[in-house]
Image: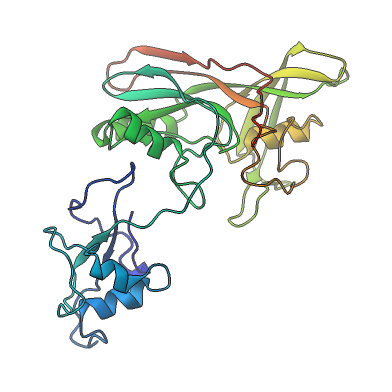
Amino acid sequence: MGIADGTYDQVVPPRSPLPQRLGLDAAWIRTPDFDSAQPFPWPTMGDWIGAKLSEFIDVPAFLAEERFVYEDGTPADGGDVYRPHTFVWFHRDLSSETFVPGQIHIVHRDERIVVIDKPAFLSTIPRGRHVQQSVVVRLRADLGLPELSPLHRLDRVTSGLLILATEKRWRGAYQTMFQRGEVGKTYHALAPHRPDLDLPATVRNHLIKHRGRMQAEVVRGAPANAESLIERESVLSADTAIYRLTPRTGRTHQLRMHMLGLGVPIIGDPLYPVVQDVPVHDFTTPLQLLASQVRFSDPIDGGMRQFDSVRRLPLQGEAR
């Protein structure tokens, strides 16, 4: 994980001299390239690191504890003379996180991929307030796979199947398969039962989600970029039914928006139809949306693959 100015965000650093810690790679920063027309305002590396990171961490303490290191693993000293184009690595301090309940079921594991069945409320990747409590961080440590990485995404509140590559060398072929839409996906959702709803139905529209906004929105009149097949699979009661959802595209919140558009919002949804103020550590009401099946032709050996979730609707919540 790098921390870089916009001028060199795309720089690929050399291999980190620090091993992973708790399944997380070390962060890195890099001094700007030398420019004779722009004299450097930092006489020492300590001054530059402080200017870069003092807003986020206790730089003097990190320097004293030799927690900043150069490419060769040598600890950075605050008095080292500033030098351009120099990488520095370190591990951040991690905030305390509430454990997310629910088991990560290993559905399949081989040399190239791991298929898991994710519980609700567990993030796919470390970000924001969910770092240690993420699939990637947990499983890198549990499975001893330091390069484990997801090939697609599931929302934190969505349960079900998630496929991960065991090593970087396998990632490209499988990610390309997802990007080309060559993976068949089936979801199931628990939602209100409407006998008057004419199903099966194919929903097509243009969805967009702006950064910083919690809800996606429909852009009226724009060419469709989202398509889902919605079928009623079974009726549980006069009020609820289980729906089979087959997305043919993969827009953010697509299934949740398409169910809402049909007048049957998914039960337990904290965003649709209205945003609810649910505490981040409240695990009592899971979204009743399950990624229940994935199927594809393996891009490496051509074999047909199909995996099914071990979970069933309705999904049960956990008390805090």
- Rendering coords of residue 308 (x, y %): 50, 14
Quick one: quadrant of the C terminus? Answer: top right
Q: Quadrant of residue 191?
A: top right
- Rendering coords of residue 43 (x, y %): 21, 85
Residue occupying the point 40% across, 14% down: 305
Residue 236 shows up from this direction: yes
292 or 185: nearer the viewer: 292
Q: Is residue 75 above or below residue 258?
A: below
User: Would residue 315 appear left or right of 81 to someone viewing this image?
Assistant: right
278 or 161: nearer the viewer: 278
Q: Quadrant of residue 297?
A: top left
- Rendering coords of residue 31 (x, y %): 24, 72
Residue occupying the point 24% across, 70% down: 64
Residue occupying the point 33% across, 62% down: 9
Q: Is residue 128 above or below residue 271?
A: below
Task: Report the coloring of the rendering.
Answer: rainbow
How many labels were placed on the picture? 0
Residue 198 shows up from this direction: no
User: Would residue 136 appear left or right of 250 to someone viewing this image?
Assistant: left
User: Would residue 299 appear left or right of 239 to someone viewing this image?
Assistant: left
- Rendering coords of residue 112 (x, y %): 29, 24
Q: Quadrant of residue 207?
A: top right
